[in-house]
Amino acid sequence: MRKRIAEILAAPEVGEQLQIAGWVRTRRDAAGFSFLEVGDGSSLANLQVIAEQTLANYRDEVKKLSTGCTVLVTGVLQESPAKGQSVELRADAIEVLGWADPESYPLQKKHHSFEFLREICHLRPRTNALGAVARVRSRLSYGVHTFFQERGFIQVHTPIITTSDCEGAGEMFQVTTPSASSVDSGEFFGRPAGLTVSGQLQAEVYAQALGNVYTFGPTFRAENSNTSRHLAEFWMVEPEMAFCDLARNRQLAEAMLKFLLRLVLTECAADLALFDRFIAKGLVAKLEAVVDQDFSHITYTQAVEQLQQSGQSFVYPVKWGIDLQSEHERYLTETIYQRPLIVTDYPAVIKPFYMRLSDDGLTVAAMDILVPGIGEIIGGSQREERYDVLLARMQQAGVDPLSYDWYLDLRRYGTVPHSGFGLGFERLVQFVTGMANIREVIPFPRTPGFAPC
Ligand code: 4AD
Ligand code: MG
């Protein structure tokens, strides 16, 4: 029976006849037989295959196997006398499905830098580290759906092509194509459209009909930020809740992050151990601490005061009204609080039009969650549900109310206090894996000047 290696190692049955299919990691020859390390991607662990010289194709094929070749191995599982593995597969037959020329195969046994691996995006998931990232990412994705579905949230597929710039930052990639049907404007959709920067505005529509909803999809930003935390295409998890204020929004975000960390700590232990050993020492203890502690919470105004009093000199000087920069965010969460930190009540002038204006007239009910090593991982807010206030905020922000008549309508017909947030999914994967660069936690990174395959 064909089995995945993860399945075999989870419950090994000595004496069982089975088949595996995977890629040769290494071949080592001994007197009269060879050892093959075979991996199939289902787990970090490989399975050792014993190939004896009595195999029909031993001399012509088995002895020529090299890193990267694809094999189908049929054999019997037996106890392994070697250290570090409980079982091995004694091969009755090895079929070679694909050769990999050892002279030109780019992935050799030696250590490759992540920068080099980015140049071979089509092969890098075969490395231990990138394979582990892919498994952890998949589990986190599953966890996101589990968390929300178990709590009765309804998933909404928000559009990828949109005519609204949610964040109002002018970072939309344009979608244009010649169209015979809209000859007048020359625009396929009759007006300028782009790739979404956030599904929030459309999620709000559904929250104001179904209560608690979430979207989890790709988002795009044409911002020219070449940093270790920015991508031009990234995935965002955006819950939106009707009848919900900022305090409950905060609690949900903290509960979600802890749920996701707990999930990978229990279900991806082997992959996390790899990151702990080779990528970020102490990672597992750090994640466990996050699960066990309460997040801290301060206002923006307090954050500014604490940064000013810290005596630390920053590239961007701190004063009330500035947008907190990455250096400020990281100083707060890494040095002052040494744990995840929720900052709320930012100045209205630095935040988008949709955030709810507070009674002071100066701040909005915004929240950012900052985590050590990353900085901002979540951005959210309570939304402005009052028609007049929203209209005024749009006008101040230079957002054309006519283009957002549908958004304003929601405030005219059965308006409701509501809140939500956006979790940068890659920043979460970065936090969980300890990867220094966000380009390593998405299968095919897109950044300015870079989109090879
Ligand atoms: O703070 P942002 O811009 O918030 C929004 O888009 C809201 N509409 C979300 C909402 O309330 N529904 O983005 C949310 C998160 C950030 O905290 C960050 O983690 C991530 O998205 N993010 C990026 N991740 C990777 N590359 C980029 N260029 C990112 N820009 C934002
Ligand atoms: Mg933000």
Image (spheres, grey):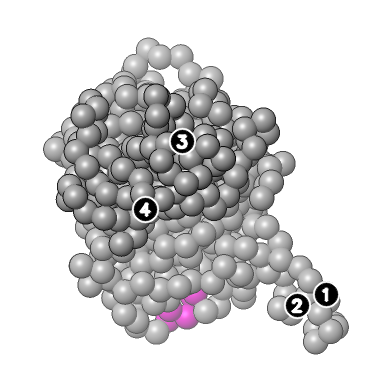
Q: Position of residue 199 (x, y in %)?
A: 48, 65
| Nearer the camera: disc 3 or disc 1 | 3
Residue type, numbered disc 4:
Thr
Neighbour tally class for label 3: few under 14, some 14-19, many 20 plus, Cα within 10 Å: many
Residue position for label 3: 25
* Res. 246 visible in picture: no
State which tag comes first along the sequence, 4 or 3.
3
364, 282: nearer the viewer: 282
Q: In which quadrant of the rendered view does residue 156 lie?
A: bottom left
At mark 4, the secondary structure is strand
Residues at marks 4 and 3, CA–CA distance in whole angstroms: 17 Å
Describe residue 227's horizontal placement relative to residue 152 as left or right: right
Rendered-image quadrant of the N terminus: bottom left
| Nearer the camera: disc 3 or disc 2 | 3
State which tag comes first along the sequence, 2 or 1.
1
Residues at marks 2 and 1, CA–CA distance in whole angstroms: 6 Å
* Res. 443 visible in picture: yes
State which tag comes first along the sequence, 4 or 1.
4
Residue position for label 4: 74
Stretch of the chain drawn in magenta: 407-412
Q: Is residue 237 highlighted in magenta? A: no
Residue position for label 1: 178
Residue type, numbered disc 1:
Pro
State which tag comes first along the sequence, 3 or 2.
3
Describe residue 95's horizontal placement relative to residue 383 as left or right: right
